[in-house]
Amino acid sequence: MLRLFRVLERLRACTEVSARNRHWTKIAELSVRFSSTKAAPRLRRMDYQDAICTLNTLQTNASALEQVKRERGHPQLQLQAMRGFLQRAGLKVEELDRLNIIHVTGTKGKGSTCAFTEQILRNYGLRTGFYSSPHLVQVRERIRINGQPIGKELFTKYFWQVYCRLEETKDAHGGSMPAYFRFLTILAFHVFLQEKVDLAVIEVGIGGAYDCTNIIRRPWVCGISSLGIDHTSILGDTIEKIAWQKGGIFKPGVPAFTVKQPDGPMKVLQERAEETGCSLSVCPDLEEYESESSFSLGLAGQHQRSNASLALQLSHTWLQRHFLTDPATSSPVEFSGVSPAQAFKPSPAMIKGLAETEWPGRNQTLKHGPVTYFLDGAHTTRSMQACVRWFNDIAPQHERKAGGPVVRVLLFNATGERDCAAMLKLLVPCHFDFAVFCPNITEAIATCNADQQNFNVSVENMLTRCLDNQQSWRVLNGQEEKPGAELLIGGGLPLVAERHSDTLVFPCILSALQWISQGRDSVLSDPNKCIIPVKPSISAKAAPLREAVNIHVLITGSLHLVGGALKHLDSALNS
């Protein structure tokens, strides 16, 4: 086990140091310096991968991240700092008003709500911008124009424009540079302004009140998806405290909508709306809208219906406000208590938008021959409950068509302060034949894609978490712990850290997927992929996987895990 830690830490350290040194050297060589946002020359000397590696230097390392958490006593200073970085990048807060923003927060479903909303408004012929997080495979996914991640060339051009403005002014500001998410938020605003979008759908990162997206002054409409417990060290340890943070995106006179919430957080949202001076409406059930037939949603899962209803209200309100004959004469919508939002008759563009929405990694099914992957980035207990309902509904449908025995495999990881044991407990009734755990490392080799490098968590902590999850799974399944020896692959690199009965821990996502699929997934057997050899004794334990008619794999617990898996499973996301 110790050897596994050392090997992976060495690989990570080498990658991090080489990336940082190489790209800081190149930055020092830049001879072109500029500060004006109006006449910024395009920098051609650095490519996309250079930009990504430089972006990664803005990630907060694990120890510094802990310090940030300890110093979170004055969160309002975060927004003040964000305004300063925005100004240094050559942008003004007032310019963001031109983006005609829809601002969305929530604990679960906010990304899906944004995806529905963006697709609906794009169907009206509008040029849309969409900022979301995290990305699954490539960081460009976070910044979309007309539903598509911006191209590598466009990302590279705008990245260096913003980065160099910040770099040249840092000495006058104590050497400060914005952290990873702050930088990407500034970059998104810059891209949307330069690309002249008709509107921008902006998903909050964490919370709302002090999230760096909340420098927005005048959104056109705000939305709150389902609330739950998450990011407690930042947002608070009760759902009411979290609701207070989420309600921080409300703006005076700007209509706000929420899905149905429990009484406690709903009362807090009502108080926030009253303090702010804005209307707050509760979305109806999707069945209440006038429609000739039931709605078809592009995103699977019963829980998506409330997200779709919220998206209908957000898009409908945006269209009404934006296309008023004289917006200047329209009155701001003030607080008058929480009221039910009206269920209207959706237009054909809205119905089509809901049906055509795609949002990878959320209730997604991929069939690769005899191996079927069910992917969902659920990472809270409430979202895991929804994931389990979806899996229990869809997996039996596939199993009935199999015509023979099917092996169920769980591939799980969770990050941060999530309650892994609580999520795993929800997964026990799914009756998995194997439970596999791995960190969010795409490959245990130095050629890992820079888009998916994460310096915020040490490899040792990630692997320790995996072993803890393995033990939790065994306890939840009533299995007594048995001594197990470390298992090695050829060349001495430990592939499997430990194995007890039907549970295994792998050092990376690729090694886990290769063991699970047993060569039966042609995508993973591609000669261009590194095939990691496994000792015969370990291969023999996978006999059920080789003999089954089908293998069904649920990948969940973390969007980062799902993204790492999709990097290997869906080539379209790598282009």
Image (cartoon, rainbow, N blue to C red):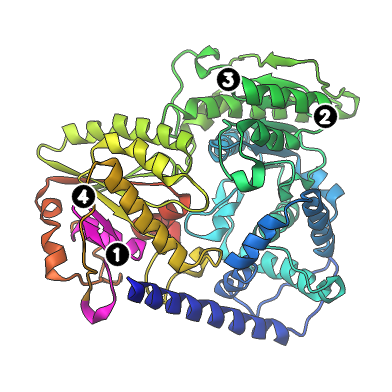
Q: Is 336 left or right of 138, judged from the image as shown?
A: right
Q: Nearer the viewer, mark 2 or mark 3?
A: 2
User: Which marked residue is nearer to the observer: mark 4 or mark 2?
Assistant: 2
Where is mark 1, residue-wise?
511
- Residue at image location 60% in from the left, 48% down from the top: 132
Residue 31: in magenta span:
no
> Disc 3 designates what residue?
346
Q: Name the residue under label 4.
A: 369
Q: Position of residue 223 (x, y in %)?
A: 66, 31
Residue type of the residue flagged with mark 4: Gly
Work out how far the residue at label 4 is from the one at label 2, CA to CA, in angstroms: 54 Å
Q: Do the residues labelled 3 and 4 touch (CB within 8 Å)?
A: no
Q: In this view, does 62 lie above or below 350?
A: below
Residues 199 and 112: in front is 112
Picture coordinates of residue 169 (x, y %)?
A: 83, 72
Above or below for 169 versus 457 = below
Name which residue type carries label 1: Ser
Discs 1/3, front: 1
Q: Nearer the viewer, mark 1 or mark 4?
A: 1
The residue carrying mark 2 is: 276
Residue 234: x %, y % from top left: 65, 47
Specify few, some or many for label 2: CA neighbours under 10 Å numbering under 14, 14-19, or 20 or more.
some
| N-term mark: 3 or 4 | 3
Residues shaded magenta: 490-518
Numbered disc 4: secondary structure: loop
Left or right of 169: which side holds 516?
left
Q: Is mark 2 on a helix, strand or loop?
A: helix
Estimate how packed mark 3 is, as few (under 14), some (14 to 19) or many (20 or more) residues with alpha carbons within 10 Å.
Answer: some
Q: Distance between the residues labelled 2 and 3?
A: 30 Å
